[in-house]
Amino acid sequence: MRDGVQAPDLVIDVNPVPLARVTQEQNGVRIGALARMADVAQNPLVRDGFPMVSQALLASASGQVRNMASIGGNLMQRTRCWYFRDSVMPCNTRSPGTGCPAIGGQNRWHAVFGGSDSCIKVHPSDLAVALTALDARVLIEGRQPVPIRDFYVLPGDTPHVETVLRPGELITGVEIPKTPGFSRYIKVRDRASFEFALVSVAVLLHTRGGVVHDVRLAFGGVAPKPWRSVMAEDVLRGKRLTKSLMDQAAEAAVRGAIPKAHNGFKVELLKRTVREALDGAR
């Protein structure tokens, strides 16, 4: 609103709604949409039970922002594409049909997966990437829980539609199922604080006798939504985790990438980060 990107007729303060609790559930944990990022990151239920979520939150924004920002707000934040944020520039996400100057312009931060002829923005949330790897569900008042993998939508020819949330609906929280295995979140960025990801990797790895029983890989900074790599997971599942297998998974993770003029480095950077994440999980 300060930048003139949005000018709503009405703004509603939802802070008085009692949605700030973190509670233990039978099969996992529930986090209220108004719980503050800093509080959730330090909550023992999250820090000990879902360390990847805590890591993703602590890698987000700055300490001051984490003290104020909510979980629901983090999931609903808009892209940091500079063309979207500049109200003078055309942008299909802000004003459908005006064009996407990022495609032929400065696109160092933009998507290498999931973009379209209408938009190549990236989703900015670290938390959403971790929740995608954990198969979390978004709780919406009056609806059945929505798997987070289905909550965000790719731009296609309607880049102004970013989630399945309908007008008048409210996120009330997220549910994270308890899943065995080691989890880790790695964020690569230009500076160590208050910076969005160039690439990030969330990995959940469960091995039995050195063999990969279950694995989830989700990426940030590379697509208009948290990007899940089923191909890389299939490479790993049922095999012994060796350096060679990690290399194969890293190659599978970038299959289908379509870099633009200034963001081709993200392909190699993602491969290296996938290998680092898997190596740390062994």
Image: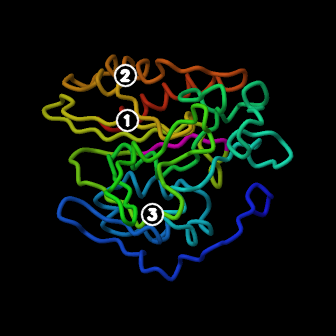
The residue type indicated by label 2 comes to Ala
For disc 2, the marked residue is 249
Residue 36: x, y in percent? 49, 70
Q: Which disc, if any, is residue 217? A: 1
Res 181 → quadrant: top left
Query: Which comes sooner in the sequence, label 2 or label 3?
Result: 3
Rendered image quadrant of residue 149: top left
Which residue, given by chain and number where applicable, does mark 3 sit on?
171
- Find residue 172 and report its horizontal and vertical position in percent: 41, 67
Percent position of residue 71, x then y: 48, 63
Tell me which residue sits at (38%, 45%) in the image. 184
- Depth check: give the residue in front, 184 or 77: 77
Give the residue displayed 58% in from the left and 20% down from the top. Answer: 258
Q: Residues within 10 Å of mark 3 (few under 14, many from 20)?
A: many
Q: Main secondary structure of the magenta part?
A: strand
Q: Residues within 10 Å of mark 1 (few under 14, many from 20)?
A: many
Q: Magenta region: which residues?
A: 185-190
Q: Earlier in the sequence, mark 3 or mark 1?
A: 3
Under tag 2, what secondary structure?
A: helix
Q: Are marks 2 and 3 in contact (CB under 8 Å)?
A: no
- Amino acid carrying label 3: it is Ile
Q: Is residue 257 left or right of residue 50?
A: right
Helix, strand or loop at label 1? It is: strand
**Residue sitting nearer the eye, 150 or 217:** 150
> Percent x, y for residue 164?
47, 49
Q: Is residue 162 magenta?
A: no
